[in-house]
Image (spheres, rainbow, N blue to C red):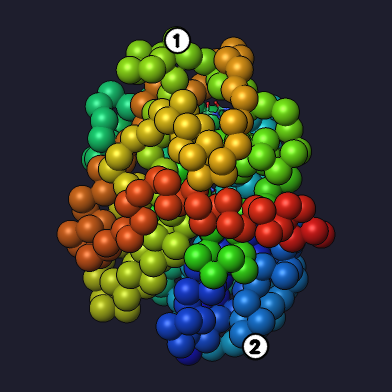
Amino acid sequence: MTILVTGGAGYIGSHTVAELISRGENVVVVDNLVTGHRSAVSAAARFYEGDIRDASFLNRVFAENEIEAVIHFAASSLVGESVSNPLKYYDNNLLGTFSLVSAMAGHGVNKIVFSSTAATYGEPERVPIEETAPTRPESPYGETKLAMENLFRWCDQAYGIKFVSLRYFNACGAHPDGTIGEDHTPESHLIPIILQVPLGQREQIGIFGDDYRTEDGTCIRDYIHVMDLADAHLLALAYLRAGNSSDIFNLGSGTGFSVKQVIELAREVTGHPIPAAVSPRRAGDPAVLIASSGKAQQVLEWKPRYNDLKTIIETAWNWHKEHPQGYGD
Ligand code: NAD
Ligand code: UDP
């Protein structure tokens, strides 16, 4: 039996594929390479280049492989872009998922693990954020992810397709063996942007606002290592294989770091002074986002191994300094 990974050439997908392969799973990857990289995909996985919105392409993939379950990463995921171009997000995220779940229903596949996001919550009333917190997304990105979760809920009821929705907080870091890492164009995430300074690719890091109601005035986020995320997907798969019911889990470390703290740790790791300058706030940034991940730890028995942000940044730096141009494609 085979696991189908959509978006398996992307950042989190490629690390999850590597982890699935290392644990002896058969893996098929579907990716249109719009933001992903062919060379990020383990050579042991079967690769299909194509779009999940293409029903005949997907039917061929399902017909040619004995798919047991799907892990679904393929999506567009830039908050700002989703605000300026919401139709792209409804098309790729919602119609893409509609097409994927239609193929699953047509081929009798009844398990899916899904990349959701902390952006489904919007500005939290309380932190750490629990799964029961209200969901009030503040962007079409978060809104389409929430709509995808709801699509799964109804398809579970109607067709018995069981799902686990994983609401990630801030994914970061790279594979400890240094072979794969984060390569987004444009890059929007804080840690790889900071590391562009010691790489000589930018002069300084802009801090988006230092007048938030936090100790040092900069935003606080919950940074979680990509290998811990990968591990959670395998546990979610095991949870569904054991016949458990559909559910939603937060994935974060439960600890928050401010933008200034992240920059300071990056200075320690790289030995570079990394100049920083305060710039205006970025629209829609909540002051503090920290996950309560107790549910994933209790129910899935998930134990994040990278609890130390300095070690997380070290794994990212290890990848970036060896691959200053990313995958170079
Ligand atoms: P990514 O852009 O690196 O990976 C997405 C992959 O999906 C890419 O390889 C892309 O080519 C592929 N893809 C997109 N649309 C497709 C389509 N229609 N058909 C086939 N392939 C398609 O992104 P990532 O950072 O690895 O994120 C993976 C998932 O996790 C996304 O769904 C994202 O919304 C979610 N997520 C990411 C973060 C984060 O911090 N990176 C946080 C929360 C949630
Ligand atoms: N950030 C920043 N400068 C940058 C990029 C990000 O100050 O060049 C801040 C951003 O405002 C947020 C935090 O860093 O408070 C993490 O941002 P990222 O885009 O990595 O993740 P997000 O919080 O949007 O999921």
**Residue farthest to the front, as pictured:** 271
Identify the residue position indicated by label 2 in the image. Answer: 64
In this rendering, the label closer to the viewer, 2 or 1? 1
| Camera-side residue of 29 and 65 | 29
Identify the residue position indicated by label 1 in the image. Answer: 211
Image x and y of residue 23, in percent:
43, 83
| Camera-side residue of 308 and 171 | 308
| Camera-side residue of 311 and 306 | 311
Q: Which residue is drawn at 66% across and 82% down?
A: 43
Q: Quadrant location of residue 234?
A: bottom left
Queried on whether the Cβ of the residue with tag 2 lies below 8 angstroms from ligand 1, the answer reads no
Image x and y of residue 246, in percent:
30, 62
Mark seen at residue 309: none
**Residue farthest to the top, as pictured:** 211
Q: Is residue 290 left or right of residue 89?
A: left
Q: Quadrant location of residue 236?
A: bottom left
Residue type, label 2: Glu
Say what secondary structure mark 1 lies in: loop
Q: Residue at x 18, y 59 (%)?
A: 298
Image x and y of residue 169, in percent:
41, 43
Q: Quadrant location of residue 45?
A: bottom right
Residue 61 seen anywhere in this rendered image of the structure: no
Q: Which residue is drawn at 51% across and 81% down?
A: 21
Q: In this view, does 45 lie to the left or right of 16?
A: right
Label located before the other in sequence (2 or 1): 2
Queried on whether the Cβ of the residue with tag 1 lies below 8 angstroms from ligand 2, the answer reads no
- In space, the residues marked 2 and 1 are separated at their CA atoms by 55 Å
Q: Is residue 139 left or right of residue 41?
A: left
Quick check: 138 above or below 50? Answer: above
